[in-house]
Image (tube, rainbow, N blue to C red):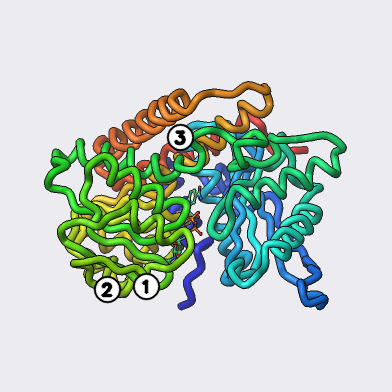
Amino acid sequence: MEYNPFDNVLHIVENAATLLGYQPSDYIMLKYPERELKVALPVKMDDGSIKVFEGFRVQHSTSRGPAKGGIRYHQQVNMDEVKALAAWMTFKCAVVNIPFGGGKGGIVVDPSTLSKGELCRLTRRFTAMIYPIIGPDKDIPAPDVGTNTEVMGWIMDTYSMFQGHSVPGVVTGKPLAIGGALGRADATGRGVMLNTQFILKKLGIKKENVTVAVQGMGNVGGAYAKLMAKEGYKIVAVSDVSGAIYCPQGLNIPEILEHVKTGFLSDYNAPGITRLSNEELLTLDVTVLAPAALENQINETNADQIKAKIIVEGANGPTTVAADNILNQKGVVVVPDILANAGGVIVSYFEWVQNIQSVSWNEEEVNEKLKNIMHKAFCDVWNLSQEKQESLRTAAYLIAVKRVVEAKKIRGVFP
Ligand code: NAD
């Protein structure tokens, strides 16, 4: 059967709603994104030809606040993926209790095949096409796979041109010079690191006994590896789309990050490293595995071979429902995506708060506030999972679904 990430989300929500004792009419609305927009994006290419790209923006829920979620540029983006990513955002914002709903967008494109000018024109056209439904009070995009601060800057500028004045709060993850937040670039990775530290402490595992493997060296995986290495954890394996590298004595993360700024891991060389496939990285015997690339990486074909004691999900949806069941049976502790990678949206929230108030916080302040929110959310999830004897994922969804349903009930059904 073909993997459909949105079905994955619905299954988890259904399970949580049943455990919460809800009737279908209490939560049926969560199964339907509020708005789905599909757009065609003609772009003048550098050679003078016109190419048309397909784009999407989905608002899953605005019950708890404006829709919030990233924009993905990837050749495999499709509506079901964007719907799933939007729904994960709803539950992510709810579990960490920030006043946002969930949204997500994407364009079917491999950004590495476009020139900077083409990428800019594509982004500006996309912004124009989703313009009617985005805005600081409506729906606030951010970076995701294949997008970065520069792309967010183009979105902010295009939206502002239509409005006739600067609107920094329309997008987060912007460059610092136009209202970006200090600490945002590393925020998702920092949140994944904090969750790793919290779970290691709960399980009584000491830093000197920890080995870590990271899948993906982008916004999330790169920052996570950097911060973990800086904290003194031994990173033994990392990967990107070109493959994985492994060194049981620990990798030189700063050197690797410098290399992947312009190249791929397949061209990186250092004494003592072994090359592995991405599949091999996932099944290494390590303390912590942090998948930080794409969905559906740990599935029923490899879940029973996972040897990591702990999985901290940097990516959204890296583990399928079937794999989750296998991992639970094996006793692998999984810190779920909606909690583990919420650092990005928490600091996006801080960015938005600063933008709409025209204030700016220093980096220490941002990191401290992030840690406080993360710690509270982690403890809420941990305590509930202990109390109910459920997995951390189920506990996280029990909290998140309850908060969204409560907001929906209070607001009522219009008209
Ligand atoms: P990115 O584009 O910056 O990096 C993705 C990385 O994954 C790259 O290193 C790429 O080479 C690698 N990759 C791609 N396919 C791979 C494969 N098959 N095997 C191994 N590596 C592969 O993306 P990102 O922003 O770091 O996002 C990664 C994940 O984290 C996504 O699931 C995203 O939704 C999620 N996420 C991102 C943020 C954020 O702030 N950027 C926040 C929360 C969650």
**Mark 3 CB near ligand 1 (8 Å cut):** no
Check whether the beta carbons of the residues at disc 2 and disc 1 lie within 8 A of each other: yes
Check whether the beta carbons of the residues at disc 3 and disc 2 lie within 8 A of each other: no
Q: Amino acid at mark 1?
A: Ser
Q: Quadrant of residue 57?
A: bottom right
Picture residue at 30% right of the left edge, 69% below the top:
269
Picture residue at 56% right of the left edge, 60% below the top:
146
Relative placement, left or right, of 101 versus 166 is left
Mark closer to the observer (3, 2): 2
Mark seen at residue 266: 1
Mark seen at residue 96: 3
Q: Position of residue 383 (x, y in %)?
A: 28, 33
Question: In terms of sequence position, does the residue under pointer 2 or pointer 1 come before the other?
Answer: 1
Question: In terms of sequence position, does the residue under pointer 3 or pointer 2 come before the other?
Answer: 3
Q: Amino acid at mark 2?
A: Arg
The answer, for residue 77, to whether it is visible in the render is: no
Picture residue at 50% right of the left edge, 35% below the top:
346
Q: Quadrant of residue 323?
A: bottom left
**Mark 2 CB near ligand 1 (8 Å cut):** no
Q: Residues within 10 Å of mark 1 (few under 14, many from 20)?
A: some
Question: Badge 2 is on which residue?
Answer: 275
Image height check: is 2 above or below 251? below
What distance separates the C-alpha of mark 2 from that of mark 1?
Answer: 8 Å
Image height check: is 29 above or below 164? below
Picture residue at 40% right of the left edge, 48% below the top:
223
Q: Position of residue 404 (x, y in %)?
A: 54, 38
Q: Amino acid at mark 3?
A: Val
Q: Residues within 10 Å of mark 3 (few under 14, many from 20)?
A: many
What distance separates the C-alpha of mark 3 from that of mark 2?
Answer: 38 Å
